[in-house]
Every structure is written in C-alpha cells, then in structure tokens.
C-alpha cells in the first residue's frame, strides 16, 4: 500500500539551504513507492493569513490557496521540513499551516528539522510539535534532525553521506505505520473534534 504524502517546507530566503533537505525527503518518499508533493512557499505563494480555506465558500478560494488545498486535502500524512528561526519555526511555514485545520484531522505528521549549526533545529521542532497537535495532525515520536544542513546535501537532495539513507529508513517506517493505521481508521466513524468549529481571529 502506498501513501499520499505532502511535504511542507517553510523558508523563502534567497540563500536557503533547507530546500535540499526537503528534496531529499521528496526523493525518499517517491523511492519508497509513495505519491509525494513538495509544497514550497516560493512555488505556492500565499498571502499573510486573512481567511482560512474553510472560511471561503466552495469554489471561491483564491487560486493560490486552492492549489495548496488540492494537495493538503487528499494527503494521508505530512512531512514538515523546518529550520529554526529564533528558537521557533519560519514565518512562511506557520503561514501555510495556519490556512488549514479540518483538512489535517486524524492524519499523522513527521518533523524534519535542520540548522546551519550542530543542533539540527530541534528547538524549533519542540515548538512545532505543539502546533501540529493543535492542528489535528500530531507528529510521530521520532524526529529527523539535520545539523550543518548546508553541507549535508547536493542541490537536488542527494545526500553527501550515504548513511542518510540508512538513518531515514526507520523514520519513514514509523511514519508509514501511523499513516496506514490512521488511513484505515478514517474509514470508520470518528467523534467530531470540538476544535473543528474554531477559526483564527
């Protein structure tokens, strides 16, 4: 069985390095037989949040928002690739995530974090865990931290050290377990979450 995975990346900086890690996750997802799409905020630009996707009537969402929704809604799980900005996540990533809510419900997420230094962005990952749980796509227990991201991959996402393939295998196996389990569970009745009635102000 294959999964439909959306990979959400958060940086729009001109010399961004994390995009190479996002491409590595995209390549790995596809190599494992999954349908995968990279949602890059430079390719799918959204305005600063005004109205969430659910607040538009069907067919009336702005075209850029609808393009992202068309990838978010059918996904079975999400891989979030985040750098660390002031101990938290990039604003472009938060902006993309905040445009949606019910569309994420009862689907797993997995956090890939990175930094230019030795700690691999794990402080941002701790912030992200709470956010993803509130959005209804709780993250799997494992993280995939990438220190010195600028040296870790070629531009196309090929890892400089082939050990990355071995390291990422267990990360994907865990995501796949949750993805398959929740995909099956979503075929049965689920109690409605109270948060489904909430919207940002």
Image (cartoon, rainbow, N blue to C red):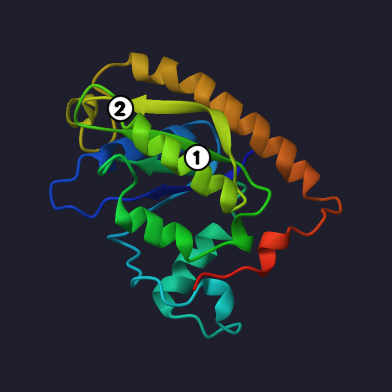
Tag 2 residue = 120
Residue 168 lies, in percent from the top left, at 44, 23
Q: Quadrant of residue 56?
A: bottom right
Q: CA distance from mark 1 to mark 2?
A: 15 Å
Seen from the viewer's position, the closer of residues 91 and 44 is 91
- Compared with residue 33, is residue 63 higher up or lower down, i.e. above or below? below
- Image position of 145 (left or right of 66): left
Residue 106 lies, in percent from the top left, at 68, 49
Q: Please name the residue shown 21% across and 26% down the image.
A: 148
- Image position of 24 (left or right of 169): left
Mark 1 vs 2, N-terminal side: 2
Q: Please name the residue shown 77% across and 49% down the image.
A: 186
Q: Quadrant of residue 138?
A: top right
Q: Residue furthest left?
A: 15
Question: Is any atom of residue 40 visible in this view?
Answer: no
Question: Is any atom of residue 21 visible in this view?
Answer: yes
- Compared with residue 197, is residue 35 higher up or lower down, i.e. above or below? above
* Element at label 2: loop
- Image position of 101 (left or right of 13): right
Q: How many marks?
A: 2
Tag 1 residue = 129
Residue 100 lies, in percent from the top left, at 53, 64
Mark 2 packing: few (<14 Cα in 10 Å), some, or many (20+)? many
- Compared with residue 120, is residue 199 higher up or lower down, i.e. above or below? below
Q: Please name the residue shown 48% across and 66% down the image.
A: 99
Q: Nearer the viewer, mark 1 or mark 2?
A: 1
Q: Please name the residue shown 36% across and 54% down the image.
A: 93
**Callout 1 touching callout 2 (CB < 8 Å):** no
């Amino acid at each position: 069985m294959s999964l439909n995975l959306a990979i959400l990346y958060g940086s729009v900086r001109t010399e961004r390095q994390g995009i190479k890690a996002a491409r590595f996750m995209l390549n790995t997802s596809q190599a494992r037989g999954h349908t995968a799409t990279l949602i890059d905020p430079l390719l799918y630009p959204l305005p600063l949040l005004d109205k969430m996707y659910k607040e538009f009537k069907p067919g009336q969402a702005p075209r850029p928002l609808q393009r992202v929704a068309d990838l978010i809604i059918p996904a079975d799980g999400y891989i979030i690739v985040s750098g660390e900005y002031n101990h938290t996540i990039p604003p472009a990533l938060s902006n993309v995530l905040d445009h949606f809510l019910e569309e994420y419900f009862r689907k797993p997420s997995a956090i890939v974090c990175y930094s230019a230094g030795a700690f691999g962005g794990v402080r941002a990952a701790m912030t992200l865990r709470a956010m993803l749980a509130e959005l209804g796509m709780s993250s799997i227990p494992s993280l995939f931290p990438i220190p010195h991201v600028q040296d870790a991959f070629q531009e196309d996402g090929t890892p400089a050290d082939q050990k990355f393939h071995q390291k990422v295998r267990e990360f994907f196996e865990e995501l796949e377990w949750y993805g398959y389990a929740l995909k099956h569970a979503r075929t049965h009745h689920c109690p409605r979450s109270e948060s489904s009635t909430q919207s940002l102000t």
